[in-house]
Amino acid sequence: MATNITWHQGLTHAERTTYLRQPGLTIWLTGLSASGKSTIAIALEQHLLHNSYVSYRLDGDNIRFGLNKDLGFSPSDRVENIRRIGEVSKLFADSGTIAITSFISPYKADRELARKLHEEAGLGFVEVHVDVPIQVAEERDPKGLYKKAREGIIKDFTGVSEGAPYEKPESPEVYIDNSKGSVEDGVKKIVDYLVEKGVLKFPKV
Ligand SMILES: Nc1ncnc2c1ncn2[C@@H]1O[C@H](COP(=O)(O)OP(=O)(O)O)[C@@H](O)[C@H]1O
Ligand SMILES: [Mg+2]
């Protein structure tokens, strides 16, 4: 057995980020259904991984079918959904990973709670509003969800159903008008912000 091993009582966040040569933080995408959050999140995750940054995306597919499979879309379940995502993304950020979340997260108070959880732990939190007019989201509607919501088949659909409003962020760190540019433009806007703030650099080294 090697003798030059130091046992720690517990690694600190600073030690983890030093070893990994990257900060842990959460990039929190918010916006209407079909605004393009998942598409941008996937492209961003790929871009970061290609550049040797450890990154992981939390999205409906790996959260709604697992950790949060007991939750529906009522107002209280939506609050709990986002609360858990806030806590889990915080753990990823604490591990030194760049967590990317892509959930509608329609309520301002819930996003503020996620931000507070991170800030209290000294972890970065970057809110990104992926914005399109609802007409554009409804035209794209790749999963036919707006159609079902208009027909009343889906209840509590954000932006359509009464009682399911989308509360726009007032001062997100990054604002993307995703009705105009390409997916790459959206990714670039986030990456440029992080580089400008000195959070990331390319190449990583
Ligand atoms: N910048 C863009 N320009 C054109 N279409 C886009 C753009 N971004 C996303 N889309 C398309 O919009 C649809 C919804 O995107 P998606 O990422 O699934 O949205 P969300 O995760 O916000 O529900 C998809 O069909 C996607 O290909
Ligand atoms: Mg999505």
Image (cartoon, rainbow, N blue to C red):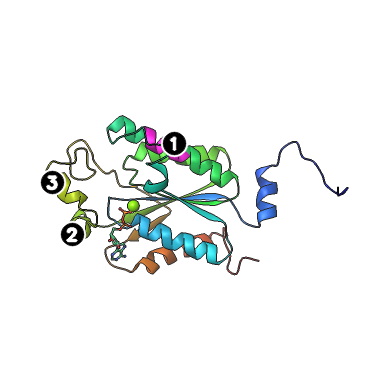
Q: Would you identify the image quadrant in which residue 155 lies? A: top left
Residue 85 shows up from this direction: yes
Which x, y percent locates residue 19?
70, 54
Task: Please say whether residue 123 is visible from this viewpoint.
Answer: no
Q: Relative to 163, say whether 30 is above or below.
A: below
Q: Where is residue 75 in the image (x, y as percent from the top left)?
A: 28, 32
From the viewer's perspective, tell me whether residue 205 is left or right of residue 60.
Answer: right
Ligand 1 quarter of the rendering: bottom left
Q: Vertical placement of 68 versus 188: above or below?
A: above
The residue located at (26%, 57%) in the rendering is 132
Q: Residue furthest left?
A: 151
Which label number is shown at residue 150?
3
Residue for badge 1: 84
- Crowding at dot 2, Cα within 10 Å, few <14 / some 14-19 / many 20+, comes out as few
Residue that extends furthest to the right in the rendered view of this protein: 3
Please tell me whether the stretch drawn in magenta is mainly helix, strand or loop.
helix
Observer-nearest residue: 57 or 62?
62
- Which residue carries the number 2 mark? 139
Instruction: Identify the amino acid type marked 1.
Output: Arg
Which of the two discs, 2 and 1, labels the residue nearer the N terminus? 1
Disc with the residue nearer the chain's start (1 vs 3) = 1
Q: How far apart are marks 2 and 1 (CA)?
A: 31 Å
- At label 3, the amino acid type is Arg
Number of numbered discs on residues: 3
Image quadrant occupied by the C terminus: bottom right
Magenta residues (range):
80-86
Instruction: Tell me the CA gap for discs 2 and 3.
Output: 13 Å
Dividing the picture into quadrants, the one containing residue 179 is bottom left
Q: Which mark is residue 65?
A: none
Whole-number angstrom distance, CA of label 1 to CA of label 3: 29 Å
Residue at (17, 37) in percent of width and height: 162
Report the side of 10 relative to 129 (left or right).
right
